[in-house]
Image (cartoon, helix red, strand yellow):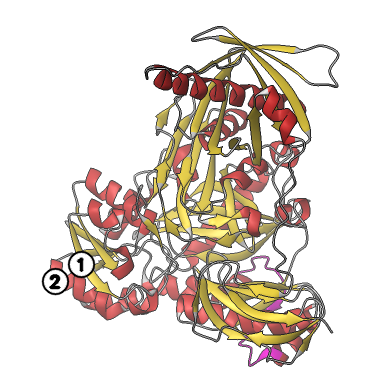
Amino acid sequence: MISKILIANRGEIACRVIKTARRMGIKTVAVYSDADRNALHVEMADEAVHIGPSPANQSYLIQDKIIDAVKQTGADAVHPGYGFLSENPDFAERLKAEGVTFIGPNPHAVVSMGDKITSKKLAMEAGVSTVPGHMGLIEDAEDAVKISQKVGYPVMIKASAGGGGKGMRIAWNDDDAREGFAASKAEAASSFGDDRIFIEKFVTSPRHIEIQVLGDKHGNVIYLGERECSIQRRNQKVIEEAPSPFLDEETRAAMGAESVALAKAVDYDSAGTVEFIVDGDRNFYFLEMNTRLQVEHPVTELITGVDLVEQMIRSAQGEKLSMSQKDVKLNGWALESRIYAEDPFRNFLPSIGRLTRYRPPVEGDRESGAIVRNDTGVFEGGEISMYYDPMIAKLCTWGPDRGIALEAMRDALDVFELDGIGHNIPFLQAVYDHDRFIRGDITTGFIAEEYPDGFMGAEQNAGVMRKLGAVCALMHDIAEHRAAEISGSLPNHTRHVPDIWCVEIGDKNYHADIRGERGLRTIVMDDDTDKAAIEMEVLINWVPGQPLVRALIDNKPLNFRADRSPEGYRVRHRGCAFCVKVRTPEAAQLAKHMPIKVAADTSNLLLCPMPGVVVRVMVEEGDVVEDGQALAVVEAMKMENTLRAEKRAKVSSIKAVAGDNLAVDAVIMEFEAV
């Protein structure tokens, strides 16, 4: 029986494995790079071993270092998590040769199904419906163009060893195919150490639905329902849910049976996922099989009650599955939000830095019957590094039905405190409030279709804005009374606090008449266009300096983030970010005469949009560039980002070269008019 597990991974998945191992009475070993010296998974494990420099290809991807750590600690098993070495058959074979148990599928299954090209060939041989494409190796960019033309645009260019959206590009024409091939190949080599690429037809308006399978070493395989993973950006899943709001029982059973048959064909004996593309008529096509634990596995655990990590451990040590297919019951609904270190207001560019505040919602049961779960590998004061995936946490909610799970997710995101870096919580909030998502009318093109020009923030209705303004006025009133009490304690100091405040939100101006002294307050809000003022009862338990505001308005909760600004508060609520200015009536009149500050003109500069490393500069000084032309490539958090010209211009000077580490807004090149 397994007594000590080394986790050959980092971050939240390492922490996740440690939790189950601890519950099973199994000791754990963490491995860490220079960047992860103070990481949460290192603190949680019973032992920890340093394995090298920060870049993954010098630490977590080096098999010799992992195996040395196994020998050093006496671990008798290795759990690879996902990514890194999780789908590397050579690694599994080396562990087997050392007498160490690999907690994952047997090497034969990994070879057969872990490689996307091989798995698609096997699926076709087994009669499984697959998406048309070219499964052979591709020599160069021009070969990629010829193949793409034959398959028919649009096509998906994908890394054979890929996962997590890395090494994937959609090409709509020859130029896209050339550029996408080069980018996918480079990204695949960097992330997986394998630069093989294949091309398949891109199915328009598809849903991405996957089946969770579970097998043992005795020939038993079952499926644990499906996950809907259609909300994706750049082929990276953002929101997952289980079950799918689209599938019916007949389609679910058919997909499950096909997944089990495919798994049995390769003697699959662990947790794995069979992924499908599903069209609007519920026709499904095999996409790939991931021979590992998936990032989104928690939603399956929440609706089935099955601990997938535990099942992987039990299967690895030779135990039979403790359940059959008829024992699998889908109970309720679960949602998962991937919280990333990326700024949605800057085209989702990666963000690195220190988490100056990290206060996730409390895990556990809610009065509504919902459950909140947060899988994370970070802590307040910790660093988000440029070397690894930008995921901060996986926030999950469960409810007896989709509506309760969805409302629990909205509430949990409202109170998730995260400062110090850019993050995608506002975007997640906007998606959950979107009519299409609420209806379950989603495809993998949802984000591109609904936010074609990028995410600029959600729109709030006038009623919500008025309520936020009322609460901000009350917060300002509380802060002013506190200041008055402090100054009033000094000799010859008195300070008058008015009862009426002028509140400005965008182009709307309100008068807030605050009545009452303590506790429940009555606030009358009006503006110049209202025939009648709106009166509301407001209760907040807030003190100056708290960024999270919890309010009850007419006995209904309203939670939002508010940070002090020179004349009020910077507010974030349900995907909307704006400033609320609170002034005395006299100050409001004077503010009308203040000049508006004009932002500096940077249109003649190419600025680095995120902290990262310059991969290549694609132009030279003196070149005339056209609108949309690729200028430079910057890599951050394992993703390559191509920076393009916004207009026709001449490159007057270049300030950065390949290999340079750049900060946000560092100048890469300057332009002059032509």
Counting labels gives: 2
Residue placed under numbered mark 2 in the picture = 72
Q: Which mark is nearer the camera, 1 or 2?
A: 1
Magenta-colored stretch includes residue 69: no
Q: Quadrant of residue 46?
A: bottom left
Residue at 49% x, 9% y: name it.
518
Q: Amino acid at mark 2?
A: Gln
Determine crowd level at label 2: few under 14, some 14-19, many 20+ residues with C-alpha closer than 10 A: few
Determine the main secondary structure of the stretch shown in magenta. Answer: loop
Determine crowd level at label 1: few under 14, some 14-19, many 20+ residues with C-alpha closer than 10 A: many
Residue placed under numbered mark 1 in the picture = 49
Residue at 69% x, 91% y: name it.
621
Q: Which residues are magenta?
A: 126-141
> Picture coordinates of residue 349 (x, y %)?
59, 62
Residue 194 versus residue 3: which sits nearer the camera?
194
Residue at 64% x, 88% y: name it.
138
Which quarter of the rendered picture does the N terminus lie within? bottom left
